[in-house]
Structure formats: C-alpha cells, structure tokens
Image (cartoon, grey):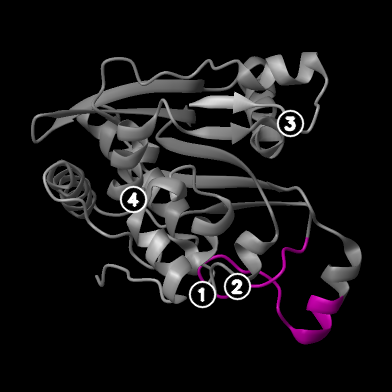
Amino acid sequence: MRLTNRAGLPDAVFEALKHKEYSRGDADISVTELIDSPRVRILKKLNDDKIEREAETLLAPFLGTAFHKAIETGTKTGTAERRLSCHVSGWKISGGMDHYHDGVITDYKTATCYKVSLDCPNGRIEDYENQLNVYAYILRENGFSVTEAKIFVLFKDWNRRSFSEAVKKGKIFVPYQQGGYPEKTWAYFKVLLWGAKEAQGYVEARVRAHQMAKALLPLCTEKEIWRGNRCKSYCDVAPFCTQFKEQSKTGIMKKEII
C-alpha cells in the first residue's frame, strides 16, 4: 500500500503516519484480520501494490496508537502489549493483547460516540466481543487462565449537549442492556466472555472461512460492510471489488446472507 499526502500534511506528521511498529511476523493471520471480512483480506493481498491511502485518513487511528503507547510505557501493573500466537487448522494466528493481569484481559480503544449510540442497539459491541474472545482463546492455548474480559473506550467526540439530549430521551448507553449515548468521555465495562468450547468453535469457523476464500472469494456480509458505509469511504479495496462496483451501478449491494 502506498501512502499519499495530497492534503499537504507537515513532513513530520506524514513521516510519523508512515511508520509502522506492528507486524504479524510469520503468522498466517492476525486476530483483527480473522474477525474481519475474508473478501477484504484477500483483495488486500492481491492488490497491495496498487492500493493508495491518503495520509490524513490515518490521523484518527494515529491518536489511538499514541493512546496505546502511553498505556504500554506508563503502566506498572500486569503485562501490556502481550503478543502470543497459536495454531488452528494448520494456520498460525497472532494476537497482541493490550493488557493482561491476573486472568483479566483489557483492551483499550479510541472510538466515536456513534459506535455505541447507533452501532449496538442492544448495548453489545459485537466486534469488540469477538476480538477479546479470540484473545482469550489464544491465551488459554498458551496456558494462561482467563476469567474476565474488559474494554476501556475513550470517546473522541463526546460533548455535553448530545449527552443532555440523550438524558431527556432516556437513551444512555448501558453495556449489554441498551445502546445510547455514553454518559462520560470514557466507558469501562465487562465484555461477555464465552465458554472455551464456544470460543474454539468461533475461531475454527473463522479460520475455515478465510482458508476457503482463497479458492472461492465470498461476498462481504451486511455486518462486514457496515450497512454499506464501509465501502464508500472506509475500504481500501473498494476500487478492486466487484461487489462494490455492482452497488455503484445498480444502487443495490449484494451481500452474503449468514
């Protein structure tokens, strides 16, 4: 992938955005890739040398990286940025857990209020839950116990006016009860921790889906395209995707039904 700077960001900022510390090493797939669309992953591999991304689109994720780095260097409790791997169906899966201590996994996120106000009407942020339970699976496979999974979310766009309006409407975010606007600039809550067999079944199914995609490229599901929002503005491989091209022509998005 080639990073462009048409917006004219300062050189220091542009160079910082180009810098990458993360690598999955010799693993076949990372946890974030595993829980995401097989179609997107395959198209990224096939078109990596053609993909362009404007640097300014990485500014928001860059803030999240800085947030993680501050926690990693500042925490004195437990282990921060623990990277482990395991093998499933012939593939090596690699995952970097933000923090692990006494059986508790904690993941740190920066997110928009949209993520909890509109994207999880039942108070369940599904991709967070999937990610932490795959981490839990990898930890167990490496001999660590997991008794709890938690998320700390720092909201980038929280404001008091929106909060006050949400209070009047009775729409305040309560994890695993109801979606709504967060009551503070941050939220810290437990994520539903699956049983060991359920986590194993999910991981094995996701590995199979990604392995099969190499032979027969599947369509993205409705969840994977974020109800169409991802394709238009947030997907690097949209220019190479026939599923998106068909939507652009017909206005109808074909998607895999699961």
Name the one closer to the observer, 90 or 247. 247
Q: Tag on residue 179?
A: 2
- Residue marked by disc 4: 37
Q: CA distance from mark 4 to mark 2?
A: 24 Å
Q: How many neighbours does mark 1 have within 10 angstroms: few (below 14), some (14-19), or many (20 or more)?
A: some
Task: Say whether disc 1 or disc 3 marks the residue closer to the N-terminus.
Answer: 3
Q: Of the residues under marks 1 and 4, which one precedes in the sequence?
A: 4
Label 3 with label 2: CB-CB less than 8 Å: no
Residue pictured at 47% horizontal, 33% vertical: 51
Q: Is residue 170 magenta?
A: yes
The quadrant holding residue 91 is: top left
For residue 244, which quarter of the picture? bottom left
Q: Secondary structure at mark 2?
A: loop
Inspect the image, locate mark 4, and give the three-letter code of the amino acid beneath it.
Ser
Q: Are marks 1 and 4 in contact (CB under 8 Å)?
A: no
In percent of width and height, residue 30 lies at: 33, 32
* Residue range highlighted in magenta: 165-183
Going from the N terminus, do you reach mark 4 or mark 3 first?
A: 3
